[in-house]
Image (cartoon, coloured by chain):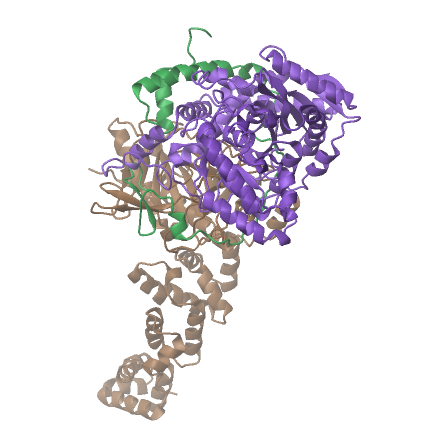
Chain colours: A green, B brown, C purple
Amino acid sequence: MAGKSRISRDEVARIAALARITLGDDELTHLAGQIDGILDAVAVVQEAAGTDVPAMSHPLEISNVTRPDLIRPSLTPEEALSGAPASEESRFRVPQILGEEA
Amino acid sequence: MALSYDDVVARYEPSLGLEVHVELNTETKMFCGCATVFGAPPNTQTCPVCLGMPGALPMVNEKAIESTIRIGLALNCAITPKSRFARKNYFYPDMPKNFQISQYDEPICTNGYLDVEVETDEGAKTFRIEIERVHMEEDTGKSLHVGGATGRIHGAEYSLLDYNRAGIPLVEIVTKVVSSTGKYAPEVAKAYVKELRDILRSLGVSDVKMEQGSLRCDANVSLAPIGSGKLGTRSETKNVNSLRSVERAVRGEMIRHAGLLDKGERVVQETRHFQEDTGATRSGRSKEQAEDYRYFPEPDLTPVAPDATWIEKLRSELPEKPSVRRARLQALWQVPDKEMAAMVNAGAVDLVEETVALGADPTKARGWWLGEISRLANEAEVELSSVSISPKEVARIVELIGAGELTDKLARQVVAAVIAGEGDPDSVIAAKGIKVVSDESSLIAAIEKAIADQPETAEKVRNGHLPAAGALIGAVMKETKGQADAARVRELLLGQLGQA
Amino acid sequence: MSELVRKSAAELGTLIAQGELSSREVTQAHLDQIAQTDSAIHAFLHVDVQGALAQADHADKSRGESNSPLHGVPLALKDVLAQKGVPTTCGSKILEGWRPPYDSTVVAKLKDSGIVILGKTNMDEFAMGSSTENSAYGPTRNPWDTNRIPGGSGGGSAAALAAMQAPLAIGTDTGGSIRQPAAVTGTVGVKPTYGGVSRYGLVAFSSSLDQAGPCARNVLDTALLHQVIAGYDPKDATSINAPVPDVVAAAKRADVRGMKIGVVKELSGDGYEKGVADRFAESLAILESQGAEIIEVSCPNFKFALGAYYLIAPSEASSNLARFDAMRYGLRVGDDGARSAEEVMSLTREAGFGPEVKRRIILGTYALSAGYYEAFYGSAQKVRTLITRDFAAAYEKVDVLVSPTTPTVAFKIGEKSDDPVAMYLSDVATIPVNLAGVASMSLPAGLSEGLPVGFQIIAPAMRDDRLYQVGGALERELHAKWNGPLTNQIPDLQVR
């Protein structure tokens, strides 16, 4: 794979935006090179398994772990808001939200 | 110039896709033990789990699973032997973890259907709506936009977040593409949501209050030229918060799409918001790039593998289907088709049934709910079920009329007073001093006065022309301010005039 | 230095129970040791002096009512576990100042057993790293040589044990974050079976791999702590609802006669330093002399483990760390009244996360994104199946598997900090364990050029007791040879 990159700088920028991280130009260039190197190293997994191998998403094979529909004490609003960068009227205060109307 | 709807459906074939979100009425949230009371003070029903605090873990509410399976069974779905939760990743401040726990490629129920009936030019016709999937997820918090004139998101200076709603169990019911409805698409959409709502109500799994958001509908609409055999580009309309709006939104989008297509323009695949006041839709902020939700199996939760015996038990305990029940009640009450349809449309079936169960005559009970009470509901612009008079109160009023203690006219006063919150029928009657005049001497006095005032009419009755008695009875009723029992007045009058 | 701080947790627990020592004296001695040594080591991000002394006083009052063998004994807690009212940062700027309004289940269990929590230990940011250099608050130094790394991500907890700042510590292990620091600091660390210890309140890095576990300077202390924190938790859907294996009895029994011990062929050879290989071979000889049968076992798919891990862990992390968005808690950057929530989120995440965390979030976001999922995340999940099958096949033949914990001894601070792929190789022997969810221990096997070497034991899921049985036997012989725990040989500690 030498010489041919697996991921372009633009693609890294797109992914960073999807992950809500604002990267500076230098950081983006540096990171794009590193990500490319890591992808090169991890791409070995693509050769490991054929289509007949089932995917495993979890080490445990248990099912149906649930709880009864019983009310447990909530936090007080003061506790809930204790770490908030800003709050007002028992609500979390956040900058103006763009995007869709909820 | 706006196209006429008839012109649109003469040339285009609509296709629909309906996504309904239902908030379950469980005591606690989907993944934590916080209460779910509607309207509680902000952030009083939150904990580390539903606030998405670092380290907190979800735990599935078993009642929510049971309710979802019951919904799936009622919609004739297959129950997936082993379904899984998945994370839907996207950033939004009302979503505490910036991912929603939902289900993706392994939903709990699949492949069902729901038959709905719509009145067409050729009479009532059944449309089968196929259900693609029913899955579980969690609701988001609510934001309040501060600053700016309208309280809306645009122009707001900042927002305030309340996470009481975050994590309330949601069930999403998604149809397959609904085609072959032709011009009835808006009616079919409305009938589907209504029938679904009735089923959910009969299951007792949700409050199904569209105005409070416990049942929400997104309508996907596309148009293609008739006979093209293709699907057009769809728009998805959100914020459709009443049955009437479902119908209006679909119709409005069909007209809007046709306008674009006629001009040779492209329909943009986008999310639009229904405007209750104008009936039109408004474009949501278009995304610069398509959403990429990066679904993957939720590693904090185990699969849901419902036991077959349990599923069969739930199936055997399903309530009677609303459509079956309607047919049964119609036969039992001997109601003509048209009136049964009117009762269904008004949402009066449950109310009439309860009233009848309390001893009222079916015809009388129906008459009150569809007549005076519906009229008052319309005036107040609320649904019939939201009017504050109970079947028990209606049954009592019917009983009082039957016993001759109220006339129809007096009963209408009582109904109005009960709805106005003045108390139950008996206390309203006591407080207002409402009573049928049964003192016969004053009645006879009124009758004699009427005969004296209208001697010619009286003479006609004496001569055997009985229809003329109506004018005299009317005069007596007027004299007694409607408090007399009209039947007794007639009896006494005819006696006086030698016709008894 | 007070001689108290060299004592084992078991010994301190006994002396406290007998009234020979108070928890306050013991706690104060360790707080003093932290005060004297931590400017050089930087094992702690937060020392909770008042809280620890209050817990110690409470432990002294309630001594009669407790039958916990660790009642009143102090402990160092990795800063990735929520403790109510005490700063919890995960080594990140983005959580600076956050005080959780709740206790993790591990902390609740520690408190219930009368254990005194001294404070929160340093770590690679969000447990991403193998050196503790990725802490936003500066690196921790290895007490054996302060120019070297103490391992990671739980370098703080391991260094605190080695520097006699605490006799017990809690770590978390996603790909080796308990075992690799234990190996390079000459301490003992156990990654329990996945689901053996509740993850409730453990700030998630990779949910399907993360596991909290006990750390100490000897096998018995580790077992005693294991017993305290393990067990079913109704708040964690992935916690195993079954009795905890009797790890304390196994540590005491420490008998390997008749056991079959498998040496993993793939975890040796190229890349493993000679000193590491020699100490490993000597340990094997000891176990053989004690009556174990040594068998070579091949796990052919282990060579794919590193690749699978560096896809699965970042993928889950990209989702788990999405919640750090400046809205509800933690850092908020750039909120000038004009910027939108979206802009403030992105600026905060840029400023609040360090380079390794950003690297992994972006890698994971990419691996899950449309068009790449099957090739990356999907393939990695299949490798996970293959590795689990390798373990299952091996356990048909042997009772436990063994290997060196790490290919090398502690490297120098700064040596690999800008070469992520080289850094990732530190975990080549520990990662397969997390992918399969089995149990594993690292314990000291001796020194190579004055630096500790770790010996790794891997047991089947829910057979954590075998770790202690084998580890206890090996340790008995080694301690006899060293005249006590290896950490007693740390050169500088005597003078400090």
In this picture, residue C284 sits left or right of residue B63: right
Q: Can residue C231 be seen in this view?
A: no
Q: Residue furthest bottom?
A: B441
- Rendering coords of residue A78 (x, y %): 38, 51
Q: Residue furthest front?
A: C495
| Residue drawn at point x = 42 percent, y = 46 percent | B166
Which of A97 and C355 lies nearest the eye of the viewer? C355
- Rendering coords of residue A98 (x, y %): 28, 37
Q: Residue C110: which quarter of the image? A: top right
Q: Which residue lies furthest to the top in this view?
A: A3
Depicted B12 relative to depicted C417: above or below: below
Q: Residue C443: which quarter of the image? A: top right
In this picture, residue C10 sits left or right of residue A87: right
Depicted B388 relative to depicted C143: above or below: below
Which of B332 and A80 lies nearest the eye of the viewer? A80
In this picture, residue B333 sits left or right of residue B256: right
Depicted C422 relative to depicted C341: above or below: above
